[in-house]
Image (tube, rainbow, N blue to C red):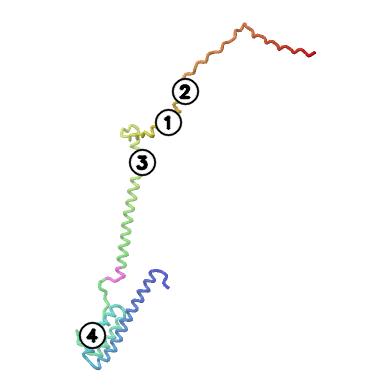
Amino acid sequence: MANTKQQRKRVKIASRERMENLRYKSRIKTMFKSLTIAAEEDKERAAKIALELISLIDKAASRGVIHENNAARKKSRIAGLVELTPGNGKTPGPAKNEPKSGKSKTDKRSERHAAKIEKIKTVKKKQAAKAEAEAKAAKAKPKKEKAEAAPGDEAAEPEAEETPVEKAVAEVEEAPVKEAVAEEAAPEAEVPPKEKAPADEKPKARKAPAKKKEAE
């Protein structure tokens, strides 16, 4: 049972090719029967059938339905049944199944594979060159930044101006700090010295509280 898409496709192709091969073989057998009958009754009709049958055999051999030796044997049988003059559809030898172009499928496949590999190599070379250029640029960038940030450089970047909202927020944050600094910087108020009692004067003695008379 086919499990993959490729296998299912191959099954369909194989069944289609099998039915086509059966059509060629069945038609060749049927025409052989009609040729044997026509060779005894009507020579002209037999000659026409023989030409059609030879063409069909050549086509079947070129498509790989039957082997070249099998095709040559069948054509020799036709020649034995019906006399055909050379050049009247009779081939001098076995049919040749030559490809249309000089290259086979294997050669074409190998050429496509080689072209694909070459394309991959060129892409990898481009990617390596790009990565190398990026690495060099990354190494040169810190040097440029250091040179720009050196002291005494007049071409320093100007500071970005603050927006009105940022200024208002900064003033609100700096207000308590300014008040604290102002309080510390203000001169201390002079405290009047306490008047000291003269040394000669002695402190008055306190009177003892009168004792309560005892109750009689």
User: Which residue is disc 4 drawn over?
Assistant: 51
Mark 2 touches mark 4? (CB < 8 Å)? no
Mark 1 touches mark 2? (CB < 8 Å)? no
Which quadrant holds residue 103? Answer: bottom left
Whole-number angstrom distance, CA of label 2 to CA of label 4: 127 Å
Crowd band around label 4 with a 10 angstrom C-alpha radius: few (<14), some (14–19), many (20+): some
Residue 118, horizontal then vertical, whole percent: 31, 60
Of 210 and 198, which appears nearest the observer? 210
Whole-number angstrom distance, CA of label 1 to CA of label 4: 111 Å
Secondary-structure class at tag 2: helix
Of 212 and 148, which appears nearest the observer? 212
Crowd band around label 2 with a 10 angstrom C-alpha radius: few (<14), some (14–19), many (20+): few
Q: Which secondary structure is most common in the magenta stretch?
A: helix
Task: Assign the N terminus to one quadrant of the image.
Answer: bottom left
Of 192 and 16, which appears nearest the observer? 192
Residue shown at the point (26%, 82%) measured from the top left: 56
User: Which residue is disc 2 drawn over?
Assistant: 183
Whole-number angstrom distance, CA of label 4 to CA of label 3: 88 Å
Three-letter amino acid code of the residue under disc 2: Glu
In this image, 53 relative to 186: left or right? left
| Earlier sequence position, callout 1 versus callout 2 | 1
Secondary-structure class at tag 4: helix
User: Which residue is disc 1 drawn over?
Assistant: 172
Q: Give the number of the disc on residue 142.
A: 3
What's the magenta region?
Answer: 103-108
